[in-house]
Amino acid sequence: MTDAYIKLAEFEQNGYVVLDSYDQSQDPTEWLDIEYVDWKSSGETRFAPLASAYGDLECDGFWNHTPPKTDKDGVWVEANVAKGPRLVARAQEPGANVGRCRVIELQPNTYADCIYNLHRDDNNRLNPEGTGWIVRGFFNLTDDPDSAMVLRADKDDPATESRIPLPAGAQLIVDTQRLYHAVFHPGAQPRYNLITSWTSGPELKAYIDKYHGVSQVESLPLDKSVIDAATADVARRRAERAAALAARGQDPRFGDGTLGAGGMEVLSEA
Ligand SMILES: [Fe+2]
């Protein structure tokens, strides 16, 4: 099915691309000025929409509106655009179609929390075949060198894991419908990151080339004992959750509303 879409070769190997680091220090801290809304996602989060389905200050999936639409042709949210012009300019720089565009605020978590939150996105719901596959850009705004975007091809297999470090100015683009992902953020302060949905095509390819995109980087070091402990902790948490839902007569795959009809999580960001 996915072959029916226009995809970029740069993502073929590992499902992600890391660009040159951006000089974040040259920009004002606009992410502290824009307006956030509470939105349930992976971990303790809030979101500040810069582009939403129809320009309102909300973060629901574009497909969950009337009329529904795929994650393309986002409408800029005027109040936040006025307070975040640099953020908007960065989202627009590739010249690729922009769908959702938002800043995420993520409170500190543990590696085990992150693994528990691993999920895939549903970026391409309603996306017409023959058009560009939707991927997501992640620009780290705060300086979180000990944090990482954790990516796995197989949710339950640590051997498939990449941990992309997130210092200020880190720029990555991820096929978040292909890869399980979540952020490990052990810092003391919230982490802020600009997330943009872009349509794959020649514009995005040129942008990746311009900033020397690479399809593999060195993972943030992490002790094997931490990984093993998280594996055990997450297995325990999942079993407890499944038991609690079963006791209420609910299918654990659909119990908390975060899973869509296909069993794919639809609300989460990283
Ligand atoms: Fe996500």
Image (tube, rainbow, N blue to C red):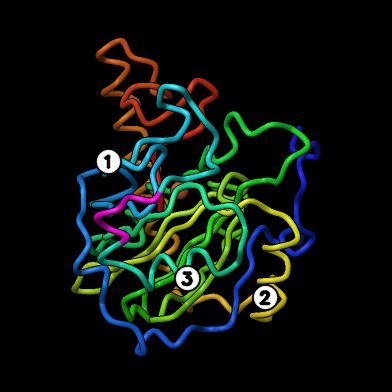
Q: Is residue 29 above or below residue 151?
A: below
The x, y position of residue 236, in whole percent, is 34, 41
Point 42% across, 35% down: residue: 61
Mark 3, residue position: 90
Magenta stretch holds residue 77: yes
Mark 1, residue position: 40
Going by the numbered disc 3, the residue's amino acid type is: Arg
Q: Is residue 68 above or below residue 71?
A: above
* Quadrant of image for the N terminus: top right
Residues packed near mark 2 inside 10 Å, few (<14), some (14 to 19) or many (20 plus): some
Local secondary structure at mark 2: loop
The magenta-colored residue range is 76-81
* Quadrant of image for the C terminus: bottom left
Q: Principal SS element in the magenta part?
A: helix
Q: Which mark is residue 213?
A: 2
Based on the displayed image, in which of its 4 quarters is residue 249 positioned? top left
Residues packed near mark 3 inside 10 Å, few (<14), some (14 to 19) or many (20 plus): few
